[in-house]
Amino acid sequence: MGREDVPGGPLSRSLTRRRWLRIGGLGALGLDLARPLRADAGAVSRRPPAPVRSCILIFYYGGPSHLDTWDPKPEAPREVRGEFRPIATSVPGIRVSEHLPHSARVVDRLAIIRGLHHPMTNHNAAAFAALSGRSPAKGDLELLGNDRNDPPCLGSVLSHALPGRRDLPTFVALPHVMYNVVKLPGQVAGFLGSAHDPFQVAADPNTPAFRLDELDLPGDVSLGRLDRRESLLRRVEDPLRRGGAAAPEHDLDVYRAKAVRLLRSEAVRRAFRLDGEDPKLRDRYGRPTHGQSVLLARRLVEAGVRFVTVYDHATNGQVTNWDAHQDVFPRLKDDLLPPADRAFAALIEDLTERGLLGSTLVIALGEFGRTPKINGRAGRDHWPYCSSAVLAGGGIRGGRVHGSSDKLGAYPDLDGVSPADLAATLFWRFGLDPASEIRDLSGRPYRLAEGQPLRALFEG
């Protein structure tokens, strides 16, 4: 489905000055029984919530259909509304897809954003936008890859800006690296350097023998022997530095120091031991890879890790991730939504029960939404001009819908949100000023985020 194929008119006519003013919040169209939350909705003034301790970002690679999940359109024509029915949730007036029954229970703790938008139509460029909060400098390329001078992903900014714990990584990504022919951009530190890349888990936490070999010393190396090796290396390097000789690269120094601390850390090893969890709780999250990855993310933030990204699916394709260009409804109903729904709801309930939801921000999104009009193969195609994201915890006042899409779910109709706004919200909730700067390899300044925090979600 091309940009001009949206029912009701071409993109060039839809994105008039008036429409963009409405996206900015000057008009409203009621699209649900619940009144969408306006950014300027006269919320009661209150003291800003305390900064969060951690964040879990769940990324649904491939682009979930917003119309068949968080933004159903039951009054739209059949070729738009699709096969699924909306169901009631724990908040009167807010309805979601019938295939999100577990998530429907926890809507009272969620803020549903129904107008997330950006211009990137290809997976790689859109993933970069979603995971960094910025449009890629090289544009909307189909096979966009990583560049050493790219801006960093969200977790890497936090790794750079926040003090970490000596015995824990600041940023963990799991359970794999994502690819679309090339390594999907938006997963690494870019110009901040590899010292701020994530601690990457590349193992299935659902396997009985799940373990991270990189956290285990070789059989013939004790902690004492490791300390002696590190001491010897410092004795060799220190005179070189004092004498002005070339020393190892800073990134390698930092990386090695982090590696040594992790090898010494019992806290890290405990956090990664899923076999210590109650089997009933593991079942609540679901036993597929995704469910156990989300559970592992909860263990990591409970241990003190600041930012954990969970990637749902590793490669792109019709039957390998959320990119359902054909047969979208059986793919969602039978394969994609059940594990995602179960794991997400279990995470929100588990964080609540442990008293961690207030200090942990949860963000769930994909790189874009799907076309309003169902295509000739009973699928939906790429659509970055409107999608949904869900936030919970971290001081959010739950049971809310932020903004709205139009009657077809094609464009934001009220209070549109950009990836830059989500990034600004994340950094603000960690106590960082989104307007503060980092610099690339040439010294060029970048704001932490170009958007504005969604403060209204945390008020009232």
Image (cartoon, rainbow, N blue to C red):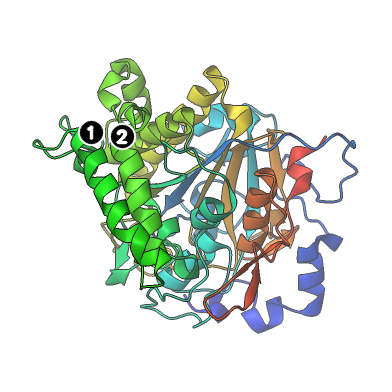
Mark 1 touches mark 2? (CB < 8 Å): yes
Question: Which residue does the numbered mark 2 point to in the structure image?
Answer: 264
User: Is 150 situated above or below 162?
Assistant: below
Q: Residue 223: which numbered mark, if any?
A: 1
Percent position of residue 71, x then y: 59, 49
User: Is 454 situated above or below 46?
Assistant: below
Q: Can residue 32 be seen in the rendering of this structure?
A: no
Residue 433 horizontal side relative to residue 230, left or right:
right
Three-letter code, disc 1: Leu
Percent position of residue 66, x then y: 53, 53
Q: Can residue 166 be seen in the rendering of this structure?
A: yes
Residue 315 horizontal side relative to residue 345, left or right:
left
Q: Give the spatial CA distance, label 1 vs label 2.
A: 7 Å
Three-letter code, disc 2: Arg
Crowding at mark 2 (Cα within 10 Å: few <14, some 14-19, many 20+):
some
- Element under disc 2: helix
